[in-house]
Amino acid sequence: MQNQDTHSKVIGYLLWIFGFMGAHRFYYGKQITGTIWFFTLGLFFIGWIIDLFLIPGMDEAADAKYEAGSIDYNVAWILLTFLGIFGIHRFYMGKVITGIIYLLTVGLFGLGILYDFLTLNGQIAEKNRLPG
């Protein structure tokens, strides 16, 4: 079976701009190092610079790990990163109730956004596995 391109290098590099906060690492499914980057500003910016060269490998690993389907990882991650406080990514995934909750509570007071950074790839993969 051929690997599908579930994640994009372009989106990875776009999120790398915010990478000192771990955004690109969360995007590629690396929650532990994403959390470390978040609390250490990308390992004091040194790891952030090194990641500039590691993104192609992280992209390949994410493509092999996650299933493509009706919900596009790239769209969901862009919506989470830039509009997460409004819950737009949740509406996109068909989670209307939690989307409304995020909209009314500023991303569930920021904690919901953090939860989604840690789990969004899994949430999308689960939705993509469900029959149409």
Image (cartoon, rainbow, N blue to C red):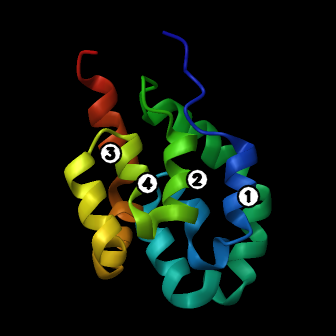
- Check contact, mark 4 vs mark 3: CB within 8 A: no
Measuring from the top left, give residue 43's x and y in whole percent: 62, 84
Measuring from the top left, give residue 7's x and y in whole percent: 59, 38
| Mark 1 or mark 2, earlier in chain | 1
Location of mark 1 (residue): 14
- Check contact, mark 1 vs mark 2: CB within 8 A: yes
- Decide if residue 18 is on the left or right side of residue 93: right
**Which numbered disc, 3 or 2, marks the residue closer to the eye?**
2
* Disc 3 residue type (three-letter): Gly
Q: Which secondary structure, mark 2?
A: helix
- Decide if residue 39 is on the left or right side of residue 58: left
- Check contact, mark 3 vs mark 2: CB within 8 A: no
* Disc 1 residue type (three-letter): Leu
- The one nearer the camera, 52 or 23, is 23
Q: Which secondary structure, mark 4?
A: helix
| Mark 4 or mark 1, earlier in chain | 1
- Check contact, mark 2 vs mark 4: CB within 8 A: no
In this rendering, the answer to whether 74 lies above or below 18 is: above
Location of mark 4 (residue): 88
Location of mark 2 (residue): 78
- Decide if residue 53 is on the left or right side of residue 22: right
Q: Distance between the residues labelled 4 and 1?
A: 19 Å
| Mark 4 or mark 3, earlier in chain | 4
| Mark 2 or mark 4, earlier in chain | 2
* Disc 4 residue type (three-letter): Ile
Q: Which secondary structure, mark 1?
A: helix
Location of mark 3 (residue): 122
Q: How crowded is mark 2: few (under 14 residues within 10 Å), some or many (20 or more)?
A: some
